[in-house]
Image (cartoon, rainbow, N blue to C red):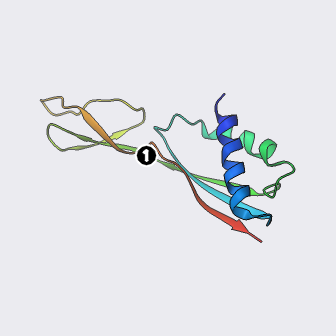
Amino acid sequence: MHELSVTRNIVAIVSDRAKGRRVSKVKLQVGKLAGIEVQAVRFCFDLCTEGTPLEGSILVVDEVDGRATCEACGAEVTLDVPRGVCECEKRGRLRIEQGEELLIKEMEVS
């Protein structure tokens, strides 16, 4: 389960940026194509924050839909998995534009 190491890294980054101040909320942006199981991150978050400035903080996760552009016709295609095909007759290769994100967007400190 790589979500545990991902969550540990998120906690370490936020803790470092907080510079000892208490963190009350962390907001993440996770793309649906990032290969991250959001529920597993939520589960790991409380465990990973114990004894850190993030202990007791709220985790907010915004999931971003996958979006790609067909290189043959230029059509925009929505993706739930990191592969797919365009419905155009050329069956062009898809260039992923959005959905692979894993970003720490905000943190609230006190």
Label 1: which residue?
65
Q: Position of residue 72 (x, y in %)?
A: 15, 37
Q: Nearer the viewer, residue 99 or 51?
A: 51
Q: Position of residue 73 (x, y in %)?
A: 14, 40
Q: Position of residue 47 (x, y in %)?
A: 81, 42
Q: Quadrant of residue 23 in the image?
A: bottom right
Residue at x 35%, y 29% (from the top left corner): 83
Q: Is residue 20 left or right of residue 12?
A: right
Count all numbered tags in the image, as a single digit: 1
Figure quadrant of the C terminus: bottom right
Query: For the view shown, which residue lies furthest in the bottom direction?
Result: 110
Residue at x 74%, y 56% (from the top left corner): 15
The kind of secondary structure element at disc 1 is loop
- Tell me the kind of residue under disc 1: Asp
* Looking at the image, residue 18 lies above or below residue 36: below
The crowd level at tag 1 (other Cα within 10 Å; few <14, some 14-19, many 20+) is some
* Looking at the image, residue 9 lies above or below residue 24: above
Q: Is residue 58 left or right of residue 56?
A: left
Residue at x 68%, y 36% (from the top left corner): 5
Residue at x 32%, y 29% (from the top left corner): 84
Query: For the view shown, which residue lies furthest in the right direction?
Result: 51
Figure quadrant of the N terminus: top right
Q: Is residue 32 left or right of residue 61?
A: left
Q: Is residue 86 left or right of residue 1?
A: left
